[in-house]
Each structure stands twice: as structure tokens, then as C-alpha cells.
Image: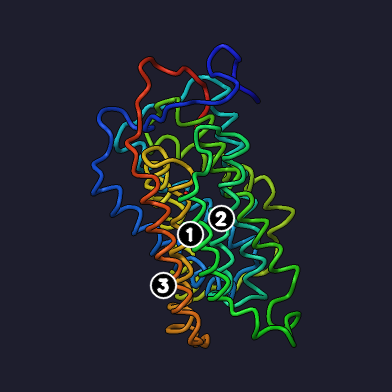
Amino acid sequence: MTPSPTTVPPAGPTTASAPTPGPAPAAGRIVVKYVALALIWGSSFLLIKVALEGLAPTQVALGRIVLGGLALFAVATVTRRRWPRDPRAWGHLAVTGLLLCVLPFLAFAWAGQHLASGLSSILNATTPLMTAAASAALLPAERLTRRQGLGLALGIVGVVVIVGPWTYLGDLAESAPLPAVLACLGATACYGLGMTYLRRFVTPLHLPAETVAAGQVGSAAVVMLLLAPFVAREPVTLSTSVVTSLVLLGVLGTGIAYVWNTQVVATWGAQRASTVTYLTPVVGVALGTAVLGEHLEWYEPVGGALVVVGVVVAQGALRRPVRRASHPVDLDTSRG
């Protein structure tokens, strides 16, 4: 499903518009939502690990997507947000639901069986690289500048330091199984493509963020419910911790957080918004250590500090005000 050639230039939109009607969100509120996203999504890997104690990976993905979809539908209904009427918009929502929910959630849940939650959160920090690559190819207006590249490079160095690859030289296969690592990297590749697709095809619709997020996660829920009879038939063992983790993962991490993420992407752009995943390893490693007893090495907080520096540099390079379109961009598409 591609947009009509008369609605958007082949090079993509050259201006950004928030998906919410009325004035753009205040800068301070966007920063608060950005930090909240880091905390919420950083804790997601711990919640996945706990949920896997009683559920299969496909059931974890199914539960969080369905709960998130219900939460977002409730928000959109209460706030009386409008729904898109053009079928192409729903088609784009389905694509983003596949790229930003179904595929990565399945991959991270499966990898969570084999990797420490902290390591999963660290691998998740490759999302900005994936997004930068996709944005450079699909969004010429978001080409990397030298300073942006420096910020991204510092973040990646920080991630490498957090991982401490020198400690795995002798037993990498046992400590971090390659298929599980590749699953996490595949998930972040989906995130990168999905965030860029959102920016390129969905943002110009000027749909409310609640509508975009609800349509995206709702489409993903439909896909997962159709697949459930075939891929989520394993027996379950429910406990208070398992149920609580799944509810938090769905309602907050997959529900409310997706509204905030949509607002951040629309205001800051795909590349800058994706740097939230530089902060999730800090949260993920800290929670894995405090709650699950995962060992924290000296180099992990050092790497976390480098990650934060990379975020500051990358954001400083992106402080140019977002230009608004002088005329409406009519594209039928829409987008945690």
C-alpha cells in the first residue's frame, strides 16, 4: 500500500506535523514523556522475564498486545478521537502494527527465555541505528549530520561497554546464544523500519495520537488473535506476579506509552525519538540486578554514562525547530 503520487513528493515529507489536532505539545511535556518512555520500556524486559514464568512467548506477546489495544481503544473512546475513514489509512496502521508490535514482541518474548533481561534491554538500544539507516534511506529530510552521527556513535560505544564483549570471548554461545541475540536485533530492525514508516506515511494525516496508537495496536491485536489458535495453545500457569507483569506490560508499556511515543516522534522526528532506547539499557540492567539478581559489572554503569552522553549530543544536534507545512499534506495513513 503506497500513497498516491499526487499527495506526497517521492522524496517524502519535508515538514513535520504532530498527529494531534491543535497546538503542538509543550516542549517540557514532551521531555517528560520521553523520560517516562525510557522508564516504562526499560522495565518491559523485566516484566517479560516474569511473565515467561507462567506463559509461553507467543502468549506473552498476545496478552500484551490485546491488553494494550483495549487500553488504547478506551482512551480514544473517552477522549472522542476521530477514526480514519480512508481504507488506505487502516492499511498503513496494519503495517505499523506488524512492524512495531507483532514481530518485535514475538522476537523479544522468545529471546527472553534465553537471555538475561538486562542484556535484552541492551540489545534493544540498537534501535536508533536501525532507525537512522531506515530514515536515511526513506526520509531524506532526516539525513544524519556529523554531530548526530557522533551522538549515535557515542551511544553505540556505550552499549558495547555495557555488554562487555571481552567477558564472553570464552563462552559466548552459553552466555548469549546467537539465535536469541539475532532475534533481538531483528526486533530492533522492525522498530527502526516501523518508526520511519510512521514518520513517512502516518504523521502527515494529522490524526490524534490516541487514534493512531489505538489503530496500530488494535490492528496488531487482530493479527495475534487470528494466529492464537495455532501458535498460543501451550498450557498456562498463572500467578499474581505473572498476571501483574502482563497487565503492566500491556496497559502501560503497550498502551499508554504508545500514545506518548507517537507524540514524541511527531514532534522530534524518528531519529531523535528513537534515542529513548539508549536509556532503556540503564533501566533494564538496574532492574535486572535489583529484582532478578542479575550481576552488575563495573563497566555497565560506565557504559550507561556514555549512553547518556550520546543522547545529549544527538539531541543537541537536533534542536532545530520543527517547521510546519505551509499547506496541508493529504496522505491517508496512520500509526508504542
Q: Residues within 10 Å of mark 2 (few under 14, many from 20)?
A: many
What element does badge 1 sit on? helix
- Mark 1 is on which residue type? Thr
Between residue 1 and residue 35, name the one nearer to us: 35
**Mark toward the start of the polypeptide (1 vs 2):** 2
The residue carrying mark 3 is 305
**Mark toward the start of the polypeptide (2 vs 3):** 2
Mark in front: 1 vs 3? 3
Query: Is residue 247 visible in the rendered structure shown here?
Result: no
- Mark 2 is on which residue type? Thr
- Residue found at the far front of this picture: 146
Q: Quadrant of residue 58?
A: bottom right
3D distance between C-alphas at marks 1 and 2: 7 Å
The residue carrying mark 1 is 277
3D distance between C-alphas at marks 1 and 3: 14 Å
- Give me the residue at 34% from left, 59% from top: 35
- Mark 3 is on which residue type? Ala
What element does badge 3 sit on? helix
Between residue 249 and residue 142, name the one nearer to us: 142
Mark in front: 2 vs 3? 3
- Give me the residue at 46% from left, 75% from top: 241
